[in-house]
Image (spheres, rainbow, N blue to C red):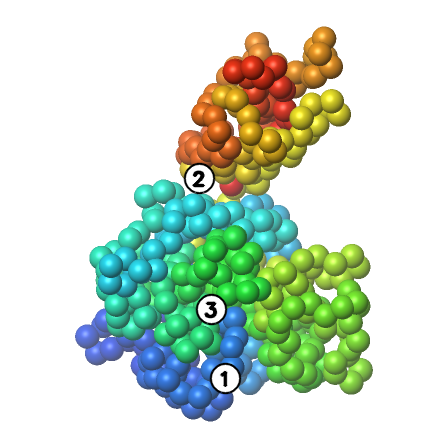
Amino acid sequence: MLVSGRLLAIAITTWWVPGLVSQQGKSSPPPILSNGKTFATWEEFLASAQPGSFARCGSVFDVPPAAELTQLDCTVSFTNTDPSYDPGPTHNINVVFHVLRGANGVGDVTNQLINSQISVLNQTFASAGITFTLDPTNIKRPPFNDTFFNDGGQYWATLAVDPDNFLNIYSNNILQASNNTILGYVPYLPQEGTVGESFDRIVLDHTIVGAGNPLSPPGFAFGFTGTHEVGHYLGLYHIFTGGCLDLFDCFFSSDLICDTPPQIVTFGGVCPTPPPPWPPVCPGGSSPLLNNFMGFMDDGCMIPFPGVEGPFTSEQINRMRCTLESWRADLFAVRPDCEVAAARPRNMGSNADIYRATAPVLGQSMTLELQGPRHSPAVAMGRLLGCERHLANGQVLLVDLHSPLLFRQAFAAPQEKVVRLVPSLPELCGLEFVSQAFIFGGGTPLILTNAIDMTLGF
Ligand SMILES: [Zn+2]
């Protein structure tokens, strides 16, 4: 069912959070409800004992009784996994990333890590047919502000950019501000009537933005906290919501999903061994999905295991696409003919296998890297067509030097890594080309590297 998310959001707002619209007609955040207690602000909630011990996520939602249904297929209390929500045409979401910094710029996050976070989102949501695009001009660095940096003050009121049409992500100091309990959160599920409000957002601690962030707490360096919070932003609850009650009416209770088996407790930490299937933890239940993105395990556990539902299950994907189409209809654009960017190394067997590249995402940075021993000046080139021409020295030329040149990138010795911007030209989406590096100069004989088959995309 495709319904205008904007209109429904307004209607639902008056049902669920009557205090949402003030007499002046301006929005103010509704109270935070947790375990039967009400908190006026996040600061008040965080100062209470409620968040408990260290958790990856501070998002707290109350599940109303099943009686409060609407006609939609994915509400706060019900999921109908209609096949029309299964992955189909690519849904692209435009992102605005706000880097909140304290005095003297503490908490800054590099553009490289921010783009890495977008790449992680594109990889982890590929199975859902959902992509994310961050235009370089949509990385915002507002003036230093200690209050905002510590997740205080209504920073969103002045900083948010069109939350109907953009996913607004803020990085700040939420981990320290929450006494080392929270790595990220969303304030509400879209089904709670917050779509398009200025506080409709995702918050990530600055230390866990991107893959390989050198400041990450142990176990959280893959960028999957961002994936987890986007899961909430697209309507998913934690898989452990409701504990063993999830055994009954699983589309109406707990996380409203049936293919995420019930968990009696919240699992965290490193993956247990041996690998799954792990023993059921609820009477009559099936193996828990400790590798699921909507749990609290370390990033290193959130990988596909053979024969086990993926880090996002089929029904979670169905509910996320339902949420996009039903509640966030203005947020995405359909990209039916566009591919997810790819970079596939290829070695003809006799070439040096030392050339690496990240996938060429339109409008984002791409990293080219020459690994292995120190080398002389080198050049990498991208050509429209590949070839296979065996040279007298046993090496193989893998790019057609007569085909159109898409880029030529020099490496100055002993430089091993370069970053270049991929143009933001949607008409290039899906274009396939081949790249290979040539090492020469000094006393070094010419070395041809492996090739990389690339696809331009999102
Ligand atoms: Zn969470």
How far across and down, in percent of the image, does residue 213 sit? 48, 55
Identify residue for label 3. Answer: 183
State which tag comes first along the sequence, 2 or 1: 1
* Tag 2 secondary structure: loop
Q: Residue at x 63, y 31 (%)?
A: 354
Residue 312: image location, x then y, percent: 64, 61
Q: Which residue is mark 2?
A: 364
Vertical position of residue 130 compared to residue 341: above or below = below
The answer to whether the residues at label 1 and label 3 have Cβ atoms under 8 Å apart is no
**Residue in the picture at 44% in, 39% down:** 364
Asked whether 251 or 73 is in front, the reply is 251
Mark 3, Cα crowd under 10 Å, few <14 / some 14-19 / many 20+, is many
x and y, in percent, of residue 81 in the image: 65, 64
Image location of residue 314, percent across then percent down: 68, 60
Left or right placement of residue 3 versus residue 453 in this view = left
Nearer to us of marks 3 and 2 is 3
Report which residue position mark 1 lands on: 52
Q: Nearer the viewer, residue 342 or 77?
A: 342
SS class, disc 1: loop
Residue at x 57% of width, y 23% of height = 437
Q: Amino acid at mark 2?
A: Gln
Task: Please tell me whether mark 3 sits on a helix, a strand or a loop.
Answer: loop
- Identified by mark 1, the residue type is Gly
Q: Amino acid at mark 3?
A: Leu
Work out which residue is located at the far bottom of the displayed protein and give it.
Answer: 36
